[in-house]
Image: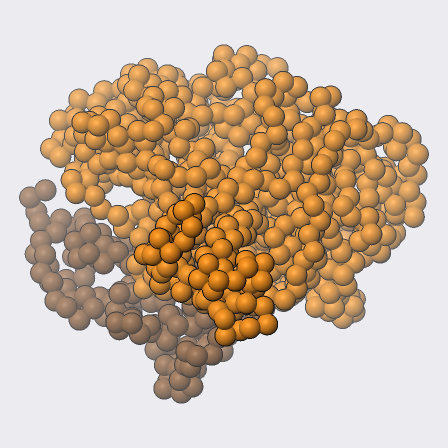
Amino acid sequence: MTAIERPAPPVRDQDKTRTWVGKSIRRVEDPKFLRGRGGYIADLVRPGMLHAAVLRSPHAHARIVSIDTTAAAALEGVHAVITGAQAAELTAPLPDFGPDPAKHTWRCLAADKVRYVGEGVAVVVADSRYLAEDALALIDVEYEPLPAVVDPERALQAGAPLVHEALGTNLAYERSFDFGDVDGDFAAADVVVRDRLRWHRSGGQPLETVGAIADYDPSTGQLTAHTNSLSFTSYLFMVATTLKMPVNKLDIHPVPAGGSFGSKLFATKPLVLAAMCSQAVGRPVVYLEDRVDNISNCDHHGSDRVYEVELALMRDGTIRSLTIDTVDDYGAYIQFGVGHHGNALAQVTGPYTIGSVRYRVRAALTNKNQQGAYRGFGSEVNNWMLEQMVDKAARELGLDPVQIRRQNFIQPAQFPYFIPTGNVYDSGNYDAVLDEALELGEYDRWRAEQVRAREEGRYIGIGLITAQERSVFSATEFWFWFDEPGAPVTSMPESVTLGVDATGGITATLYSCAFWGNSPETMVAQLVAEEFDCEPQDVSILYHGSKGGLPATGPGGSRTTVMLAGAVEGASEKIKAKARRAASELLEADPDDLEWVGGGFQVKGVPEQRKSLADIAIMLHLFKHSFPEDMESGLEESQVFDHPYTTMPSADRKDLGVFYPFMGHACHIPVVEVDIETGQVSVLAYAAVHDCGTLVNPRSLSGHIVGGTAQGIGTALYEEYVYDDEGQLITSSFLDYSIPSAMEVPELRIGHVETPSPYTPHGIKGGGEGGRMMAPAALNVAVNDALAPLGVRVTELPMTPDRLRAAIRAAGAQQR
Amino acid sequence: MSDKHEISLTVNGREHTLVVEPRRLLVDVLREDLGLPGTHIGCEHGVCGTCTVLLDGASVRSCITLAVQADGRAVRTVEDLAHGPDLHPLQDEFWDKQGLQCGYCTPGMLMRAVEILEHTPDPTPEQVREQIASNLCRCTGYQYIVEAVVAAAPRLRGENAWDPTTPTEAKA
């Protein structure tokens, strides 16, 4: 490893006496949603608003020969029809952070050829969505179908149809990284365990699709937008650039999102379409995806990987090294580059003391909807891969699956611990999590039950896994892939303004942040209440639009609570400093003789000499002349909180620096039964113990564990965007794309261990990606445990009944 | 379109007469024509249950129900549950148990829960789980929804009045 400087932030002395942080209060957001008054994008109506609908390609790969929009444009109630070729004149390409973006140009509508089923070719603006869709049916598109490439490995073979001719290949990115002495560690190892693993694509599929309302004012050139996409600061300049307009003429207002799970991160296309249409007709235009729009064209399908992996071990189970060779199917475009593998590299060695890693990644382009973000952003796939390998190693070496993990754990005294890639794990106590999970999951009882069941011819399996949940990313993971980043380490800030009104009421303003199912309002309300000894319900929360906003990044990579906590802490300190000085003037006492007690400042030892925050606030708002010249009226302060711990990669990329430092951990133990006649998997019991540092609202975090696990069950057993050999999407509705219902999700037993981060306010780590980080790995291990007596090992997700039956049949054939 | 139909329907106890295209969906009439945005649209295929409302007391998917099919009938939506500042017991318990995250499936889930508790006033958790399987939730994993519906049942039977002064504590 090349030595680089990794300046760590100061270690905090985590105060354990807290009033509100750590309490499962009712979420302050909920009453409006319970009443159906959430104010989602579909609920907003602007005067004179028109509706847009998009015509989508039925072909996976085809040249657009001609488009005739005459009949559509002539339909009564239609205001505009814009084809892809016209859109390419009106807008610039969409932002694409992949390598060589000019060679795989991505636009809001396809201009010359379509590259996947569902890609937009024209948009209609009409008085209503009904009329807009009527008009779509009148557009006549002549296509010249081209051969499609669907399988990622075939896409990389010579002679495969090219998704982007300008690129000259379907290989968008390739590089191999060595971290540590891989060859030496393999040479020293007793055994090498090998496997080929396949993870098919699933996605967030929130029940609400993506939408935007754009209102262009031709007299000022100002465009006002409302959208349920997330993370506005970078989104703002991405959208403005695409619209070829100055950033300061665009004002984006956040609207609550009916779920995201990653899939509403930078959803640029819907707003660009709405804005382009609004500019064309001079009226407000809403574009809201329908379900087929979203499934086929959301730009946020999840990872789609083939792995060849080798794990080098000693005979006693000590893991020495790991080599990973992965092909990832990015679909037709590559908006985030291979950042998903940066996520994987943040925790590539899991909770284990593995000394070296080789990581080869190839990004393949195919005729499918492109990859984006889905809860885990590719690191959950790494968790699955690593745990399948550890599980296989335990079987091949005849070791206990609990013991092999325990003996490789990083120990509490070893933190902060730098893994071979250069990322740091701030803290952890993996044995404590494992111990609690074994007890909560009644591991020993289920092992006995498993033996009994096998005697009855039943196939019960126990899936123990231990894995990481990295939190609070730094953007280096998006550019350390290249030798010439042209960028220093990024700060990825989050900001909060706290205002105390004349009566002492507190309003917290959030930037680049929207409600999306997590609880930013509850988190901030609890954190503010902790600082100011008020009730969380009494804190008012404001979501600021992009115009006039402070620097901020927005949600993603389980960062929001940690970053908002830092911003609240900083703004609170400033408020209290000013309030202390004001109180000292009012009490005629030295500021240093005052102490903050129960929501006000009082003279130490003289509690009757006291000014509450409300006493101080009204004086500062209305009676400024009671204070020295240099004190301004009012009581409002902001804090821009920058990423507290991130460092540069080394020039040779043998050390990627610190980019995902606050490391959560979990142990999941599902118990499954496989019906070997039908391939049906039933979950009999499920225990999950998570450690993401100090909890702010335990109930809320538990909700993410259960909800994420439900999504992980979908990924493991049911959900897949299936494209046939011609590239036709055959799961284009929820009839075919199977989301788990209440009958597929078991009741979880949930445990929490709290190992505070030494580097964050209150010791909080991110936990929002919850159970989806762990559940696919755990269920795969459980199914393999159930089927081990048959000699069956499943290496492909989702483990649908037909895949399981095929594996069982194949094993049976071998035995005969 | 020329062949519009006049329909009358009672929504949350209030009668409305409208003229609609035969293809117009009930959910669009509720949301756009009657100004009741609480009923949401999820999959538009009748699969996810997000758009669930009660039609003459029985749950239907308003995204695949034509407005003309509601002619002469009574519709009940989430807007009918709370009375002024007072939430319905199911809403209270969803709040208390954190039976929602993004809130998008919540109105449909609540209307389905109303129906479940009318038919099964004293359900077991297993009965609730099986019956809410009609509706998808992408956030919660259903566990706290089941808890909320079970907790609301005695209150709807007139027992165990909710004490708003008792704060929720960590139950997980």
Query: In the image shown, does A94 or A146 lie closer to the viewer?
Result: A94
**Which color mode does the image show?**
by chain
- In the rendered view, would you say A777 is above or below B153? above
Q: Residue at x 12, y 67 (%)?
A: B15
Q: Residue A310: x percent and y percent? A: 79, 35
Query: In the image shown, does A117 or A773 lie closer to the viewer?
Result: A773
Q: Residue A761 vs residue B62: left or right?
A: right
Q: Residue A750 vs residue A212: left or right?
A: right
Q: Residue A533: x percent and y percent? A: 50, 66
Q: Residue at x 32, y 23 (%)?
A: A245
From the rendered image, report the letter of the chain displayed in brown: B
- In the rendered view, would you say A660 is above or below A22? above
From the rendered image, report the letter of the chain displayed in orange: A
Q: Residue A785: x percent and y percent? A: 74, 55
User: Image quadrant of residue A252?
Assistant: top left
Q: Residue at x 58, y 62 (%)?
A: A593
- In the rendered view, would you say A341 is above or below A713? above
Q: Is residue A235 visible?
A: yes
User: Image quadrant of residue A233?
Assistant: top left
